[in-house]
Image (cartoon, rainbow, N blue to C red):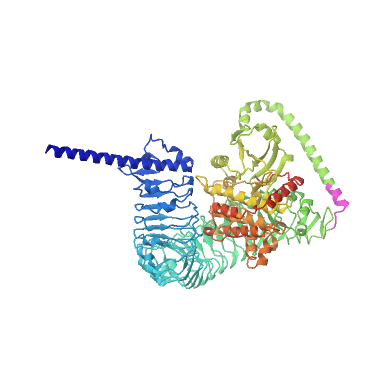
Amino acid sequence: MAPKFIHLLLLLAVLSFVFYDSSQAIRDDQFRFFNLMKASLSGKALSAWDVSGMKSYCDFRGVSCNNRGYVESINISDWSLSGNFPADVCSHLPELRVLDISRNNLRGNFLNSIVNCSLLEEFSMSSVYLRTTLPDFSKMTSLRVVDLSYNLFTGDFPMSITNLTDLEVIYFNENDGLNLWQLPGNISRLTKLRVMVFTSCMLYGSIPASIGNMTSLVDLELSGNFLSGQIPKELGLLKNLQQLELYYNQHLSGSIPEELGNLTELVDLDMSVNRLSGSIPESLCRLPKLQVLQLYNNSLTGEIPGAIAESTTLTMLSLYENFLSGQVPQNLGKSSAMVLLDLSENNLSGPLPAEVCRGGRLLYLLVLDNKFSGKLPDSYANCKSLIRFRVSKNYLEGAIPEDLLGLPHAAIIDLADNSFTGPFPSSIGNAKNLSELFMQNNKLSGFLPPEISGAINLMKIDLSNNLLSGPIPTEIGDLKKLNLLMLQGNKLSSSIPSSLSLLKSISVVDLSNNHLTGNIPESLGELSYNTINFSNNELYGPIPLSLIKDGLVESFSGNPGLCAPVEVQSFPKCSHKHNQKKRNSMWAIMISVIVFTIGAILFLRRRYSKQRGVVEHDETLSSSFFSYDVKSFHRICFDRHEILEAMIDKNIVGHGGSGTVYRIRLRGGEVVAVKKLWSRTAKDSTPEDQLIFDKGLKTEVETLGSIRHKNIVKLYSYITNFDCKMLVYEYMPNGNLWDALHKGWIHLDWPIRHQIALGVAQGLAYLHHDLLTPIIHRDIKSTNILLDANYEPKVADFGIAKVLQARGGKDSIITVIAGTYGYLAPEYAYSSKATTKSDVYSFGVVLMELITGKKPVEAVFGENKNIVYWVSTKLDTKEGVMEVLDKRVSGSFKDEMIQVLRIAMRCTYRNPSQRPPMNEVVQLLIEADPCRFDSCKLSINKTKEASNVTKVESQPEV
């Protein structure tokens, strides 16, 4: 008995030793994996991992273990890591159940080893932007959730995923580098699948009817692909479906199945941008839980079913760009709190629905380009929540409700191309958030009210072709953000106000076909225009010389009294009489200034003795008021006093929408650019508003100061006191890209232009993808791209604009449209939300400028057309493509320029989801590098030599 017991003890001891030894080996192997991770990846988030062995890996941030010490979960999403992710993860971590490596910049062959993780249940690698082919997933038999969205996969889609019968969720968004593939009929084997999202991933062919058997589906999204054929009626069998997204396939055709009315759990239905025809099924409009119905950009006909007005859940109805006719149900919105109604570009007629804003939540009311008639309902003037109101191109008439233009949150009001009459409402002064006002082609009469200056966020005004009379109010010069002013075709009289020269952001001005008289203010020549038109008025006197030099002389035709100070065609040279009159005026001004100054000195001397005690009493307050706080972000030696002393008129080198820019040489020899921000305090703003603004600006400035990237302009310091705020930047000796391209001061060859494009893309990619919190620029344009001595571009003027545009007193909300005419993405017509894809669109416009040498908006493109439209009309033929290329540089670089043109076209896709992310744009531009031969270096050197001859001593808007 005793020997058996001893043998048993020995056996247990051996087994315990083997078990301990095995467990220790596994722990060592798991530790080895984390050592590999920290060695091969870089990023601040990993600094807390102590891989020396002093701390258990189970305590690492992002790591969790089971009760036996085996790693079960790793989540490093959003850690901004970069480098090679270790392969063979599951050989090191044999019981791994969850792996999330999303939103990092990872490389390597790790995906081929991860697919061997048979116990892995959840795997996410969204937004890794990995360029590789996809392996066989068959071994991942435990997988329930997989997210492979936003990558750069190539080759074929892995059909082996259909073997993963435990799969419950699959996301496969934005993978447009794959070969075209079709949804297989046996996809219905995935009977547990609740979420199936295949958007913008190169799907084509028909939607299999067998999907109707996947009754566990709650979310089915197949948008942004190339699907064709009819929508199968079997989708009506998906009794649990809450979201159905089939938009932007462009080739889905036939009628909308009546059977979709059986989807009683459906909340969101979007089948927009296809070729669907027939009428809207009434059964859809009776769905009890439907909140969102979007069918825009199809070929639907018939009337909008009356049942839609009975819905108690509907919040969004978007049916624009169809062929719908008849009247809109008049009770629409009476039973449900509508947020969006877009019926634009149809054949709808009759009165507008008066109850649509009854719920008090309506943000977007868009019915442009229909046949609506009658008056605007008075109820619309009480729709305080509205952000966008567009009723243009209809047959509406009568007076505009007085308070309509004063809606406190409206960013766009568009009443153009109707038959509105009566005066221009003075309530415009209450529109603190209004960014765009379109009222052209109506019959409005009376004066343009001076209260318009209260709409401090206005960027675009088009009141052309009305019956407006009287003077242009001088107060319009208070609209510092204005970049488009269209007043042509009215009966405006009196002179052009010199206050227009205060509009430092203006790019398009048209005052033609009025009855304006007097001289053209000399100060207007200080501004930089894309387009200017003062033709067909009654102006007289000299045309400012700077406007002639900018090639704008044709914009003054039809004014017989005008003359030119130099010899030009179409205008007589100004006589000595004009010049003498100008000198007399200058003498009169100088004498007046001298007399005023002497009088002021005498007055102050008289008061000095009486108020000396008061001045001494207030000395402490005055000292506080004029004291400056300096916040520095980069090492540079300067005294704030030398900055302040150098901020004089002769050092001004530019003006922009957010301030005046000075070029200042410091005592140490360095040259900096100093921007003094415009004061944006609203008349009705409170000290609390000021405090909120100051905190917002400080936070934004500190964010910008922390940025370190070679293609983003350095912010050296922030200098501020009670009423003055200044930013000190690095100085860019070659000015901005706009001046280099469009004013001809520097010749930019194609290799230089490509270098600029790549640098800007790298800067934007850094902002969008390499920061823990992405930064959206909001105003990418060629004037905000600065060039250093070697033509390396620096992206400037971001972030600050967002804070400044939000400042409008207590009634302001941040729905102002940041951006510049010609560069704005088309989705701004329907949504005020800025995204990284908005920046991508604006960057695409800049690419087109570099490729074509043309401005974003030119008369040659056609009325209300831009460079994106013009380029798109030229791509059908080889000759058209050649016409697009700037002949000054295309020479031996045609193929490379066409490569970049393809990138520009992708960046400016109308659908934001189809635009590539900026880190992909960077890779595409690298692949289009023209500098593969020695001649490229010669080209760059020639450009630098040329710039030394015509050096630009101007620092644009920083």
Q: Nearer the viewer, residue 594 or 886?
A: 886
Q: Nearer the viewer, residue 258 or 788?
A: 788
Residue 180 position within the rendered picture, expressed as x and y whole percent measured from the top left = 49, 65
* Picture coordinates of residue 405, whole percent (x, y): 58, 56
Q: Quadrant of the N terminus?
A: top left
The quarter holding residue 541 reads: bottom right
* Quadrant where the C terminus is found in the figure: top right
Q: Is 638 part of what is drawn in magenta? A: no
- From the viewer's side, name the closer residue of 393 and 544: 544
Can the viewer see residue 768 in this picture? yes
Q: Which residues are magenta?
A: 572-582
Q: Is residue 662 left or right of residue 56?
A: right
Left or right of 301 in this view: 537 = right
Residue 929 appears at what percent x and percent y? 62, 53
Looking at the image, the residue that sits furthest to the front is: 3
The residue depicted at 36 percent of the width and 58 percent of the height is: 167
Q: Is residue 133 left or right of residue 671?
A: left
Q: Position of residue 345 (x, y in %)?
A: 56, 67
Residue 730 falls in image quadrant: top right
Q: Majority secondary structure of the magenta segment? A: helix
Q: What residue is at 44 percent from the left and 67 percent from the top?
A: 308
